[in-house]
Amino acid sequence: MTAEHVIVTSTTDSESAARELAVKVIEARLGACAQIVGPVTSVYRWEGAVQTGREWRVEIKTTADRVPALTESLRQLHGYDLPEIIATPIEGGSGEYLAWVTTETRNGG
Amino acid sequence: MTAEHVIVTSTTDSESAARELAVKVIEARLGACAQIVGPVTSVYRWEGAVQTGREWRVEIKTTADRVPALTESLRQLHGYDLPEIIATPIEGGSGEYLAWVTTETRNGG
Amino acid sequence: MTAEHVIVTSTTDSESAARELAVKVIEARLGACAQIVGPVTSVYRWEGAVQTGREWRVEIKTTADRVPALTESLRQLHGYDLPEIIATPIEGGSGEYLAWVTTETRNGG
């Protein structure tokens, strides 16, 4: 992980579950800001057949050093056995905004 | 391309076309999981004027080594002359989930 | 910033404001194509409490060399004091599409 800031994305099966994940990780300062996008249609292979399902996506802006704790927290909070949890790098943009992301993810702020 | 896993995104002009792209590439193991997001409003310049249109986005999680074949397949399946097909890197998250993406994109699984 | 092409994302509080941002930056050739996604639910901490709000996201495909000017333009056009403006790298996909993004973001095209 070379980027200082990242977006961590997970998906779940209801809007309320997505909101709960978002609120809990922001409360715990594991991310500065989360966005819930959905419903989206997921298409995947399960037990040999292609399946589709309705899901909601949670996208969390955070710092790279918070990714392990955020991933572990999402795994514990999540209702799925094998949840999608992926981190994508942020490589620029507004310096002030990224500084705010850093501040919001420190303890005791 | 240095990331082992990527998200490949394309957009098309109907939800049914987006679903068809998603199902075909998952069936062909060119990706592990696709999500359809939309409708979104696209804004672009065409023949000198700014145009807007309603589109659906297909986002496919796959491995970096599948990107050339996936790109070629999307190009052939796509109804557009010059479709958007872009790959963005995944740099972390759940190791188990990323291992599942790798398994699902191998042949004969 | 090592990627040649990037996605610059911002969020704002209405669909019309999102459209205006998108149209203005495409007109100015600061990006080739923008997509408006929403509404999304944003969750963040403000003055010590977790807040939620409805927002629209603008995602702009452009070249890395246009990011500083695009960021500055979004800052000036934006109604927020501290808008989200983040750049995420594109690392592959359709070469023809990415060449089109480059052409559309040059002046005098």
Image (tube, coloured by chain):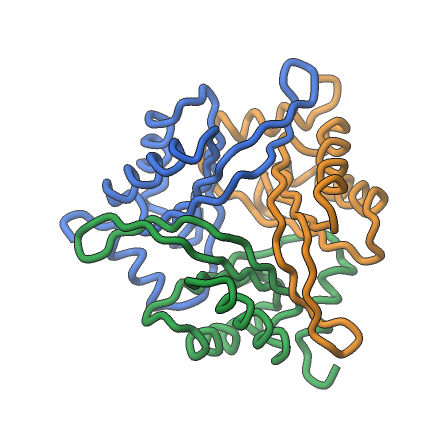
Chain colours: A orange, B green, C blue
Residue at the image position 67 percent from the left and 52 percent from the top:
A86
Q: Quadrant of residue C15?
A: top left
Tell me if residue A89 can be seen: yes
Residue at the image position 39 percent from the left and 73 percent from the top:
B79
Residue at the image position 46 percent from the left and 41 percent from the top:
C9
**Which percent across, then down, holds residue B33?**
65, 65
- Horizontally, is A41 left or right of B40 in the view? right
**Which percent across, then down, holds residue C11?**
48, 34
Tell me if residue B4 can be seen: no
**Residue C16 vertical position relative to residue A86 in the rendered view, above or below:** above
Q: Which residue is the extreme one toward the left?
A: C108
Q: Nearer the viewer, residue C76 or B68?
A: C76
**Residue A32 vertical position relative to residue B105 in the rendered view, above or below:** above
**Residue B93 vertical position relative to residue B25 in the rendered view, above or below:** above
Q: Quadrant of residue B109?
A: bottom right
- Horizontally, is B52 left or right of C10 in the view? left
Q: Nearer the viewer, residue B106 or C79?
A: C79
Q: Quadrant of residue A47?
A: bottom right
Count the marks: how many?
0
**Which percent across, then down, holds residue A16?**
74, 39
Q: Nearer the viewer, residue A88 or B43?
A: B43
**Which percent across, then down, holds residue A10?**
69, 49
- Horizontally, is C20 left or right of A12 in the view? left
Residue at the image position 73 percent from the left and 73 percent from the top:
B103
Q: Which residue is the extreme one toward the bottom?
A: B108
